[in-house]
Structure formats: C-alpha cells, structure tokens
Image (cartoon, rainbow, N blue to C red):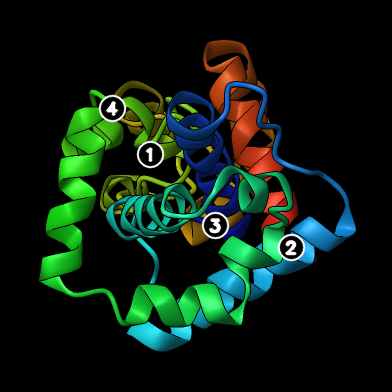
Amino acid sequence: MEKEEKIKYTIRLFTFLMKRIISPEFVFPGGGVSQRNLTACMDSLETLYKSELSEERLTDYCVCQVYAISRFEASYQRKWNVSHSFGKKAVDRFALNTPGKRYYEDLWLKKGGFSRVSLLSEFKNKSLHPLSKFIYPDYEDSTKSRLNGTETGFYICCISTLMWTPFSPVCRSCRFEKRCKGITNRKYAELFRIRNEEYTKKDKE
C-alpha cells in the first residue's frame, strides 16, 4: 500500500473501533496536525519493523491503541487527541506489546463482537480500487515484447493483454503506443483512467 492508503486504512479502522466500542460520537479530527502525526507514525513503524506496513500490522496497531484508550476513564477519553494514539509514546506502546497483552486485547475485541480476522475481512483492501492489481500486470510484458512494433505484435497485444499501461517499458517503446492508448481507453475506460492517475502520482514523487 502507498502511504496515503495506509493512512486512510488506519483512520477508517481506528474510527470504526472508537465508534463501536468507546464512543458513538467519535469523529477523527482532520487537518494538517492529524496528517503530520499519522505520517510520522507510519514512518516510525516502518523504521521499527524494517518493512512495509501490512493491513495486518496496521490492524494490530489500531487494536492496541483503542484498547489502551478503553482502559482510561471517560474524562481522559474526552481529552483524547491524535498524538495520544499516533505519537512517539503510542508507537513505543505498540513496540512493547506482548503476547499476553494481545490475549487481553483479543478478549476485549470478542466482548465487542469483533476479532482481528473479522476486522481484516471488513477493512482489508477496501481502500484500494478493485482494478488496482491490473494497473501494471508486468507478467504481460513478455507477450507485449513478441513482435513488438509490428502489426502482428500489435494484434497479439490487443487480443491477449489488457493493453497499454504507462508503467510498461514495452508499451512506452512501441511505435503503436498512441493508437493503443486510444483503443485501451475505449475498451477499458476505468482501467485506463486509474493507470494514468497512478502514473501521474508516481511521477510527482
């Protein structure tokens, strides 16, 4: 997941748990401060675990933080702000989580009618476009490379692949690229749109 997608996933899941278990009136605060806290939190977690953050890890993180909030009195809950659950102390809290603590988190989740598995099933990949896995199917490049730049090769592409994507070096080097883009847009309009949108985002990074 891209960082923006990780943040959206985290906000949605954290808000869900807060509303269902802590307070139905909870609203995750917007604005630059919240965004900076969440971005710094994602960076810290990636540094801590030396890897990309999966939905599983983000789910565990949200469970840990909302469970911690549930242990405080209502007066604290009313004073909650983003740094309490996404600041340095919160990251340290998660890093020090033990199997024993996770056991009690699971009991707490079960009491609320949830589990880590059910939360993942509900939220995993919901923030992703259903066609996102086809933005760059690199396995198609071997087919696209066959007779690349010839009428025969172009015909093979049209019937055997999802056609043009800006991420493919084969597509970008093909002399039929302009023609192929037009056909791709007609045949796969939504896929064409999200491919261009994602490539534009990558280009700005």
In the image, taking residue 163 as reference, residue 82 lies left or right, namely right
Q: Position of residue 92 (x, y in %)?
A: 45, 82
Does the residue at mark 2 contact the one at mark 3 (Cβ under 8 Å)? Answer: no
Label 1 CA crowd tier, 10 Å (few <14, some 14–19, many 20+): few
What type is the residue that disc 4 sits on? Gly
The numbered mark, 1 or 3, whose residue comes first in the sequence reads: 3
* Residue picked out by circle 4: 112
Between the C-alphas of marks 2 and 4, the distance is 44 Å
Image vertical order of residue 153 relative to residue 1, above or below: above
Image vertical order of residue 29 relative to residue 7, above or below: above
The structure residue drawn at horizontal position 24% and vertical position 41%, both measured from the top left corner, is 108
Between the C-alphas of marks 3 and 4, the distance is 30 Å
* Residue picked out by circle 2: 203
* Residue picked out by circle 3: 2
Label 2 CA crowd tier, 10 Å (few <14, some 14–19, many 20+): few
The numbered mark, 1 or 2, whose residue comes first in the sequence reads: 1
Q: Position of residue 21 (x, y in %)?
A: 43, 30
In the image, taking residue 55 as reference, residue 19 lies left or right, namely right
In the figure, residue 184 lies in which quadrant?
Answer: top right
The numbered mark, 2 or 4, whose residue comes first in the sequence reads: 4
What type is the residue that disc 1 sits on? Lys
The structure residue drawn at horizontal position 54% and vertical position 57%, both measured from the top left corner, is 2
